[in-house]
Image (tube, rainbow, N blue to C red):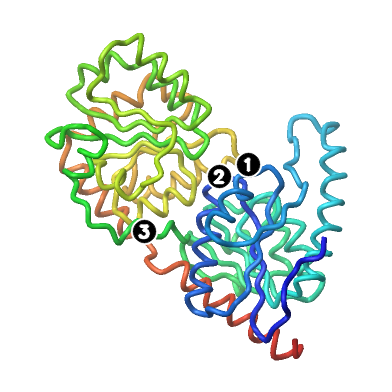
Amino acid sequence: MQIDITMEDKLRIVISGGGTGGHIFPAISIANAIKEQCPDADILFVGAEGRMEMQRVPAAGYPIKGLPVTGFNRKNLLKNIPVLIKLFKSQRMARQIIKDFQPHAAVGVGGYASGPTLKVAGSMGIPTILQEQNSYAGVTNKLLSKQAQKICVAYEGMERFFDKEKIMLTGNPVRQGLINHSISREDAIRSFRLDPEKRTVLILGGSLGARSINQCMIENLEKIKSSGVQFIWQTGKIYFENAISAIAEAGELPMLHVTDFISDMATAYQAADLIISRAGAGSISEFCLLGKPVILVPSPNVAEDHQTKNALALVNKNAALYVKDENAKDKLINKAIETVSQMDLLENLSKNIAKLAFTDSANVIAAEVIKAAKKYKNEHGC
């Protein structure tokens, strides 16, 4: 498993984590910012085999190594025996990757692979920097924080999880290209073959889709048809066929654009007067940066129910609306149709969520990583 690199006099940095777009997009943004500030830096990603990062990271132009690590089964402890075997194997592999690559710093963005990689790096004396995206810290980052040099967070009050002296309030890096676009709202809406004169709701369920949100849409197609509102509906790949079948049965729906995946999110955001979304930390950071009114439907299937905590952090500042996952089928579409026509409410939500934005997160985190890497390199003469 020898990595073919030339050991030149330049910084070498490992970035580890992934599993979902919410982890991968910030990781790539940090890598891009490091390359902007230090063009000669060598960056190696470490991800989990079979997860999304194994495709998305190479597509962004960076090499990646995969570990067999998987998540723990919290409901059936006996099923964790093979998980533990994979974890031990992943730690051995991570140690070899670190020995071969000889990084000057390691960055953990959350996700399965960040645990063994950052633990090994820290135990070998390499400075580690964590990026905690959520308002409620995950178990892995809480464990890794003992060795971490810095912990970059997106929410206030994180000292209840981490050493206050290590915390930096940086916000979450977002996908590049969301800000510097020139398309108008009208042209953005037309690109989805919809009517610029109508109010538009963008439905997002994350990169894989969200069952309750998609089911809510399917069961309310007649209400959507008569609402006078139009919808851009990203189903996720898992739910796309069911959505298409339901629409075929419902008849013509010219006010509905359905797709499994939106590659041009800048245009989709520009088209939206209101967004419906899960409450992943990365998505919330994008909504803040763009000042987008949003109804959050936190996923109940995440560790420590952290999406509800993310949502309430905004709701308590009148910066977002909130519908419980269990109530989505009965309440979500009614709330969206009602909200998107209330201009004063949309304006207040937009103003309040924009106050929570961090505009330069990736560069701030990258500068901290480079500083730690240079210090280590100078001290160890490597």
Q: Looking at the image, do the residues carrying marks 1 and 3 touch, with CB atoms under 8 Å apart? A: no
Residue 338 shown left or right of residue 132 in the figure: left
- Ranked by sequence position, the earlier of labels 1 and 3 is 3
Q: Which mark is residue 177?
A: 3
Residue 170, horizontal then vertical, whole percent: 48, 67
Q: Residue furthest top?
A: 249
- Ranked by sequence position, the earlier of labels 3 and 2 is 3
Element at label 2: helix
Q: Residue furthest left?
A: 197
Q: CA separation, marks 2 and 1? A: 6 Å
| Residue carrying label 2 | 306
Residue 314, horizontal then vertical, whole percent: 39, 49
The N terminus - image quarter: bottom right
| Residue carrying label 1 | 303
- Residue at position x 86%, y 51% from top? 89
Q: CA separation, marks 3 and 2? A: 27 Å
Q: Looking at the image, do the residues carrying marks 3 and 2 touch, with CB atoms under 8 Å apart? A: no
Q: Looking at the image, do the residues carrying marks 2 and 1 touch, with CB atoms under 8 Å apart? A: yes
Residue 326, horizontal then vertical, whole percent: 48, 24
Mark whose residue sits in front, 1 or 3: 3
Q: Nearer the viewer, residue 83 or 34?
A: 34
- Residue at position x 35%, y 9% from top? 249
**Numbered-mark total:** 3
Residue 57, horizontal then vertical, whole percent: 58, 55
Q: Amino acid at mark 3?
A: Gly
Element at label 3: loop
Mark whose residue sits in front, 3 or 2: 3
Q: Nearer the viewer, residue 363 or 42?
A: 42
